[in-house]
Structure formats: C-alpha cells, structure tokens
Image (cartoon, helix red, strand yellow):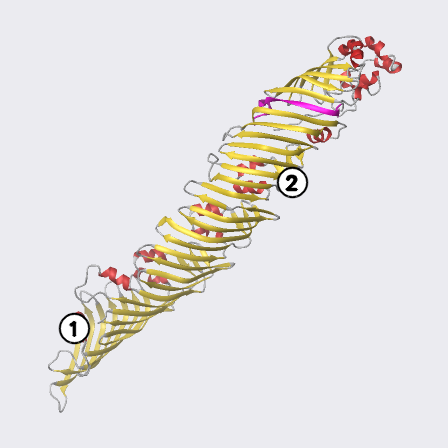
Amino acid sequence: MHLSLHASSIPDTTNLLNATLTLRIREVGTPWASTTNLQFTAQWLHALTNAIPLSGEGQLVCDRVDAGSATAREVRLKTHLVTAPKSAARHADASWAGWAWLEPYILDWDARLTEVRSPELAAQEVTGGGSWHAPDLLLTNLVARLEQRQLAAYSALNVATRILKLKFSSDLDPHALAPLLAQSAAAWLAPFTWEQPPEINGALSLALPPWTNRPPDWRADLLSSIQLNGDCNLAHGLTYRDVTFSTARSHVLYSNGVWRLPDLTLTQREGRIEAALEADQRTKDFSLRIHSTVDVRELRPALGQGAHNVLDLFTFTVPPVLEADAHGRWDDLQSIGVQGRASLTNFTFREQAISGVQTVIHYTNRLVHFISPRVQRGAGQATADAVVADFNGQKVYLTNAYSTVEPMVIARVIGADVARAIEPYRFDQPPVAYVHGIVPMHGEDDADLHFDLAGGPFNWWRFHVPEVSAHVHWLGQHVRLGGMKMQFYGGRAQGDAGFDFHPGGPTDYHFAVTATNADLQALMADLFTRTNHLRGALSGTLIVTNANTTSLQTWNGFGNLQLQDGLIWDIPIFGVFSDVLNGMYPGLGSSRPSAGTCTFGITDGVIRSSDVDIRSTFVRLQYRGSVDFEGRVQAKVQAGLLRDVSLVGPVVSTVFWPVSKLFEYKVSGTLGEPKAEPVFLIPKVMLLPFQMPFHPFRTLKGLLPEDLGASRTNTPALTPPKGP
C-alpha cells in the first residue's frame, strides 16, 4: 500500500485546512469484496471542528473487483462535495433518520463499471451519475449496455415524502432481466420469445416505507402506492407458446394494484387483434374488450386440448371477425362472463363448406348463448331465435330454428353417426325445416328434438316423390316420424313410423303407411327400374308392427291393397294365364281388370293372403298363398271365366265352372319367373270343346307339348327389389 497525505492551513483563516490524498494498493481483500490496483485520489477543504469535509472531490479507480457473486473488470467513481450555505433552510426532522445527517451537504458523483458479471446479469458497461441536494437524491444517466443494447434510467427520491420516481427506456431482451424479477413475473415472461427485443419506455412512482418505525404491512402499502405509465413496442416477431405475431404494441398502466393495457394491438400476416385489458391483482378481477380478425386456428398452440379438438374441425379462407367483452376472475372460470359478436365467412366445419355465420354471443356460468344466429350456405340459410350450449349439462338447446340448408350438410356438422343414419333419405332440393329441442353434446340418450319438414323432390330406396312433409321427434334412442304426408305417384300417401336404436346392435322399427290412387305404372317403374305396360290406380295400407334392420325377414304386420281400372298382365305372376285365355278368345287374357283387392298379413318377412281377387269383364283371378322378400312364391290361383259379365255373368260362369277348375294352378318359383302347375291333371284334349269354336287351328297347335309357365318368352323377368 502507498499512501500520500498532505494538509496545509489557509492563510488568513483559522481551523481550515486544504488537504490532498493519494492511495494506491496492489491487492485489497475484505470479507465482502476484493480488488487489485486500487487507486484513490482526493482534494478537499476541511474544518478542524467537523469530521466531514466542507467541500472537495475525489476519484476511485480499481481493477478486477470481486464481490462474491458479482464481478467487474474495472470500476471508476468520481465525487464532488460542497457544503450548503448556512443561510439555506433546514427541513430535516426525526422522520428523516440518517438522511438528516447529510442535509447540510451537496454531493455529485459519476461512476463507470465495465464487464459486470453476476448470476442475474451480464453487462459490457454500466455508467451513471447522481446527486444529493436535500431532500432530493437523484440518479441520472444510468445506462447499462448488454450485447449492443441498453437499459437507461433516471430516478429521483425525495427523502422527506419518501416518493421515488423512476423513468426508464430499454431495448434489452427482457429474458436477460428475468433473474432480477419476482418468480411469478419470471414464469409469466418465460413463454414469450421474439426476433428482436421490444422497445420499452415508462415512468414509475412509489412511496417507500417510513425510514423509522416501519409498520408490519409496509409491503402491502408499498405495492398499493406504485404507479406505472409506459409503453411497449415489438416490431419484429413475437411468439407466445408457438403462436406467432408480426408486431405487438401497447401502453401499460398500473395504479392501486390494477393493470391496464388500453390499446394492445397484435398483428399477423392476415389479421390483427385489438384489445383493452384491465386486471386487479388483488381481487383477481379482470375485464377484456377484444376485436379480432386473425385466423383463430393460428392461436391453437396456446390453447388447451379441448380447444384444439374444436378448432381442428374448422378451416378458414377468410379469418373470422370476433368482438367480445369479457369479465370475471381469472382464477375462477365459473365467474367469467362474455358478450360479443362473431362473423365468419367462407369456411368449412367438419369439411362442410359454409358461406357465412353471424351471431351474438353471451357466455356465463359455462353457458354459451348464441342469440339470433344466422347461417348461409349457397342459396340456403339456417336461423334460430337462440342456441344455448350448456357445458354443465353437456346439452345444446335450440329455440325456433329454421333451415333451408341441405339436411346432409347439417347431419355431417352434427356428426358422422347422424349423417350415416339419414343418408338414405335424400332431398333433391333442400326442404324447409323448423326445429326446436335438445341436442346432447355426447351420445344420444338426452336428445329431445322436434323437426317439422316439408319439401321435395324426395328419394328413399327406390321411391321418388315430388313432395313430402312430416314431424320428426328424436327422443333419446328413439325417433318417431308422425304426420307424414306426400304426393305419391299421382296420388297421395300418409303415415308414421318409429325407430328404436340400440348402440352397437340393430335398430328396431315399425311404421304404417296408407296410399290412395297411386299410378301403378310409375310406381312399378321405380321399384323394378324397367319399362312396363301396367296401368291402374293403386290404393292400400301397409302396417309393419315390428321389425329390425338385420333383414327384411324380421318384418311382421298386415295390410290391404285395392287396384282400380288396372292392367297388370305384364307382371309374370298375374300373366301366367294370358296366353291360354287369349288362345281361347282374343283379348280374354289381357282384358283390363276393373278392380283388384286383397288383405294380407306379414310374419317373419313372409307375406300371406287368402283373398287376392282380380276382376275383369271376362276373367276373375283369385290367389291365395305367400311370397317372401326374396320374391319366392307359394300360391294357388284360380281363373273364373266370364263371371263378371253383366246380367249373364253368373249363368255363364256356372256353365264354364268346369273350365274354372281346369284353370286352378299351383304357382311356385319367383315373382319374376313363376312356375305354374295345374292342380287337376286333366289332358289338354279335354279343353277342345271349349276352344274349337273360337280358334280351331290355334287349338290344334296348342295340343303340342309346351311349358305353360315358360310360354311368355318375350316377357322380361321381374326381379324383386332388395330393400331395407
């Protein structure tokens, strides 16, 4: 150590000295710090009656300062001290504590530290200055430079009022300052990253606790006194939990424990979020106003798995427009309420293209209210007075919904199971639908939904009708179809049906339908997809009391049919006698029936009737037997000749009674290829007396061997439909 001290009196004064001091130490070690090449120089004016100099200045320079956890390559400190005039007012009192001792003095200083290192911070250089002029302690021009960036600050402390004011600006990476922050603040900051650090400017003020007699709750008083007014501007890429924004900026205000971000703006490539946030850190209450035009799918990484599942159902060509006001407590989801509007354009949901959606949204207590939602898809639209999603009860409530959107689109939006259930029922043009009731979010047990449908053309299986209307009630695992009315092949039809679903198993169902004056030719053309020469008006009732979807062999029920002014010989099973009867007399086997009737029962998919009665002027056919849904026939048929001829019919029928017995046959095979065998094996020659008067040559030709069941070689086979 080298110490040089010089003091000399001042001429013409007493008790005053001029002093200079030079101190050099190569190495210094203390329990608190160590350094090398320490050099201190000072010049001052000293009164012999006071230990503190009256005025002076000094400079400290040292290398390799090591204070345990913090180090610096070089430290430089300059100070300047003067004594305030004796005439200056004195304000210090006991509340100043130790500051009162410094009141008579005025002090300035400048400092510079290079290559400062600590576990919390690393800086290439820290510079600053300050002053003390009672009652104000100032820190001026504090600048910390870290990796070509810097933090600048200015502070002023009034020791009488204990008010500390701080102004600052920074373009440092905030992560570099994270070790200096509270643990909660550092955790909040951790998910944020940026291409270039934000620019931060602000002013902070707070009231320090008393210098003496500090109260037990002084920390709460300190926090309540903090006031902050600043702004943050990030111009080059912000990422939060893998969600990227191009820019971000906002003013930041804090007072009385309340944070405010009045103009938060986040931009992306194709949209932006504008928000105003207010949050009370004491009560945890918050309010948020937001306007967004970003693709919400871009926010997916920052949201929970539940939100992921929902957002994955959407794709957007145009970002949605969302406006919302939210309020509540951020630590209590049950308390959060939201009011807002949503407008979506040209997007898909579950791969279904939607032209537009507009709605008002209210959310509270895990209930989402969509007020007056409107949906557009092409020329179709769907509306409702309200749609309520109850996440407590896991249900969706529809009120006065109306739709002209294709049913399959709505079904696919609801889910794949519903789409598969209604896929066989198709409308060429979207029907008008009125809907209300309850849709469960999971499963079907809690469903209670009513549909009123009207529209057409409508297609199911092989049926095509121009118009249909019905009321549908979906209740749990049951669907009831009531009040069904339709135009039916030139006539009318009405009926009802019921379906009982068993998850993982077949569906039980029943139905009843009544048709009147249906055009037989058009109906059979749809059922068997070929041209025909059938004529007539068909009416009847079909009631299936129970069945299930495993097969048509589960059908049980009954019904009846009536045919007016019909021509049915083109159906092979009814035309088995046409050639023979026509051979007896032209037109006898193809005369137009005036009426046909039957009643029937269905047991295990087999239709049985004992009273099929087909009447024409010259012949009357009576069937009794069965046919199944594979088209297999087991029946007996008898032809009565000329029985229904006016006046003479009964007499002629009696005369020709033996012929009627000759035309009693067993019919087997299928509807399309029936095989007929006579019940009574009487040789064809027995028919000569009845045929010769009409066609002698044709009668002789008919004696040649021929298979009656295959005689209609030009009649195409009638293949029974394979239906549900």
* 117 relative position to 526: left or right: left
Question: Which amino acid type is marked by label 2?
Answer: Asp
Residue 382 seen in render: yes
Q: Position of residue 641 (x, y in %)?
A: 78, 14
The foreground one among 279 and 191 is 279
Task: Mark 1: give few (<14), some (14-19) or many (20+) Cα within 10 Å.
Answer: few
Q: Is residue 631 on the magenta stretch?
A: no
| Residue that appears at 61% across and 48% down | 378
Q: Which residue is mark 2?
A: 428
Image quarter in which the N terminus is found: bottom left
Span shown in magenta: 549-568
Q: Position of residue 206 (x, y in %)?
A: 28, 66
Q: Position of residue 712 (x, y in %)?
A: 78, 21
Q: Residue furthest bottom?
A: 12
Sequence order check, earlier mark of 2 and 1: 1
Q: Is residue 563 on the magenta stretch?
A: yes
Residue 201 higher or lower than 333, as above or below: below
Question: Which amino acid type is marked by label 1?
Answer: Asp
Q: Residue furthest right?
A: 697
Q: Main secondary structure of the magenta part?
A: strand
Residue 356 higher or lower than 432, as above or below: below
* 208 relative position to 643: left or right: left
Q: Which residue is mark 1?
A: 93
Q: Based on the displayed image, in which of its 4 quarters is residue 194 positioned?
A: bottom left
